[in-house]
Amino acid sequence: MEPLVHNIKHVAVIMDGNGRWAKERSHPRVWGHVRGSGVVSHIVQEADSLGIEALTMYAFSSENWSRPQTEVLVLFNLLYKFLKKERTRILKNNIRFRIMGDITNLPEQTRKLIAQLEQETAHHQGLKLTFAFGYGGRSEITHAVNNFIKANPGKEISEEDLNDFMMIPDLGDVDLLIRSGGDHRVSNFMLWQIAYAEMYFTKTKWPDFTVTEFRYIIEQVAKRERRFGAVAPTNNLQDNIIVARENQRAIRG
C-alpha cells in the first residue's frame, strides 16, 4: 500500500489516562487498563495501513514498579493476552515485534512468548512494532554510555556511537510523540530519540482514543514545517537584502 504520509516515519505513543478514565466511572484503576488494552490493536492496524515505518508504545515505565501490586500484575497479564491474541495478525502482516526495556520480572511464560515472537518476526520487513516495558529513557542512555565505554576504553563518544548503543538502534529518531490523557510531559520516554520530534498532547484518555483521532493527528502533524533547528528558506526580497548586507559587514569585520 502506498503510504498516506511520507514525513512521519516513527510514531511513539504514551498511552496515558487509563486509571483516571476508570475512576471517573467509579471503577478500579485496573478496569481502565483492561479497556485501554483493546485500543492498542486498532492503533497498530491503523499505523500499518498508513504506511508508518515504526510504532513504539509506552506500555510500562521503570517508575511503574511503584504502583500497587494488583495493578502491576494486571498489566503483566494484559501484555500476555495481547501477544497471544495478536500473534497471528502480527505474523500475517509482516510486522517486526520487539520489547524495549527490562522484562526480567515478567512471568516466565510471558518472557518465553516475547522471545518466540521476536524470533519469529526477526526478518519481517513491515511495521516495526515496539513495546516499551520496564523502560526508562535516562536508564537507556546511561546503559548505552557505559556499554560504549566498556567496548571502547579511552575513546570519546560521538552522537553516532551513542545511537548505535541504544536498546534498538534501527528504530532511529521519533518523528511524532503522541500522549493521551491531557498531561503535557514526556515522562522519561525515549529522551534521546525525541530530540527533534513533533509533540501532540490530546485530552482524550487512552480507553477513548480512536483510530479516527490517531489518523487526524498524523494528518495534522504531517502538515507542520519541520526545520530541525534550521531556518526555512525565504523568498522575501527585503529579507534577502538584509541578509546580504549583514554578510558583507561580517566579511569586512
Image (spheres, helix red, strand yellow):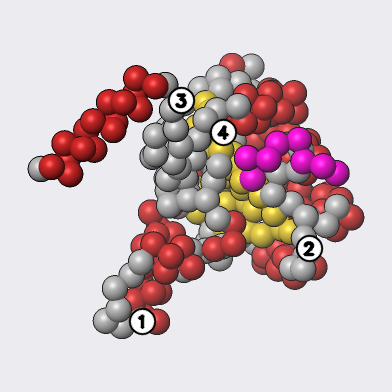
* Mark 2 residue element: loop
The residue tagged 3 is: 235
* Residue at (64, 53) in percent of width and height: 130
Residue at the left extreme of this rendering: 253
Evaluate whether residue 19 shows in this view. Answer: no
* Mark 1 residue element: loop
Q: Nearer the viewer, mark 3 or mark 2?
A: 3
The tag on residue 124 is 2
Evaluate whether residue 175 shows in this view. Answer: yes
Above or below 222: residue 138: below
Across and down, in percent, residue 79 comes to 69, 50
> Do the numbered discs 3 and 4 sit on residues whose CB atoms are within 8 Å?
no
The tag on residue 152 is 1
Spatial distance from mark 2 to mark 4, Cα to Cα? 25 Å
Above or below 240: residue 56: below
> Do the numbered discs 2 and 1 sit on residues whose CB atoms are within 8 Å?
no
Across and down, in percent, residue 142 comes to 36, 62
Q: Nearer the viewer, mark 1 or mark 3?
A: 3
Give the magenta-colored segment's residue range: 1-9
The residue tagged 4 is: 178
Across and down, in percent, residue 93 comes to 85, 52
